[in-house]
Image (cartoon, grey):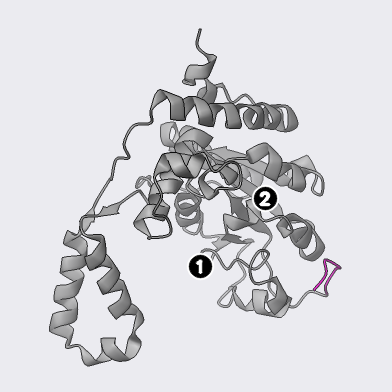
Amino acid sequence: MNNQAHPSPGVLPNFLIPGAAKAGTSTLFYYLKQHPDVFMRYKEPRFFSDNWELGPEFYSRCFKGYQGQKMIGEATPRYMRHPESAARIKSLIPNVKLIFTLRDPVKRAVSHYWMRMNKRLESRSFDEVIRGGRTEFPIDYGLYYTHLRRFLDLFPREQIYINLMEEMKVDFKSSLVGIFNFLNLEACDIKDEGAKNVATMFRNRSLDSLIRKVRAAKRLKRMIPSSIRSRGARIWKLNVMESFKAPDLTNDQRRYLEEIFLPEIEGLEKMMGMDLSLWKKNYISLKR
């Protein structure tokens, strides 16, 4: 399917959160869907990246249950880095508002690596992964200037909003008000409950893998008595290490990542008219 315009199939979003992964998209999704004038059904339909061939009618069904709210949205971090997503979004919903929530790319890379380790998507050491270069997931998702430039080439600046994860942690209410203003929404009282989708790690990864397989096997799941299923759920919770803290980077690893990300940060600053010194102030490669 090419990127030519499509007739509207029905309900489509008028705002998107296209990224970045491990930079607060889950948190922002959770809080925005609490606004009475916002409809967000579920996270990551991945239409403009993985499911484009299914057509706009499929995408419209992702918003089943819409009841007339002013703003309709979804969040799929994969859109930011997918090479065709920006053009596809432009072809179908050209007036859409785009909210990018970003985070210091060095810290984001570390978080992304450990998430992939936890989900058994990665088995290499952190050093092996980052030395693989710009195409590795933990690095690629942090190439903000490279990826956002595709969107700036197609959408006017006023349709794009940058939310910084670090600023939201410091002043939750002001960050939300800025986003509400961008979406032309009245501010409402939403309580800060902390970050969602925080880093975790399993004490026993083999046990986690077994539990996941049982959950995925629906026929097997139906055969297991509810008392045993509830016991399994308790075991799964005990197996989770909450608030997992990743090992510190070595100075060599940090410098290597900073050298990759600094040009991207500076390019983003110029392109978006931003000051990102809150990221750069701790970079050891900039200290004399």
Q: Residue at x 68, y 32 (%)?
A: 268
Residue 252 drawn at (x, y percent)? 44, 25
Dominant secondary structure of the residues highlighted in magenta in the image: loop
The secondary element bearing badge 2 is classed as: strand
> Residue 42's mark?
1
Q: State the residue in front, 33 or 138.
A: 138
Q: Residues within 10 Å of mark 2 (few under 14, many from 20)?
A: many
Residue lying farthest to the top in this orientation: 288
Kind of residue indicated by mark 1: Tyr
Residue 115 placement, left or right of 109:
left
In the image, the segment drawn in magenta is 1-6
Q: State the residue in front, 286 or 189.
A: 286
Residue 229 drawn at (x, y percent)? 19, 80
**Residue 112: in sight, yes or no?**
yes
Residue underneath mark 2 = 98
Kind of residue indicated by mark 2: Leu
Res 142 → quadrant:
top right
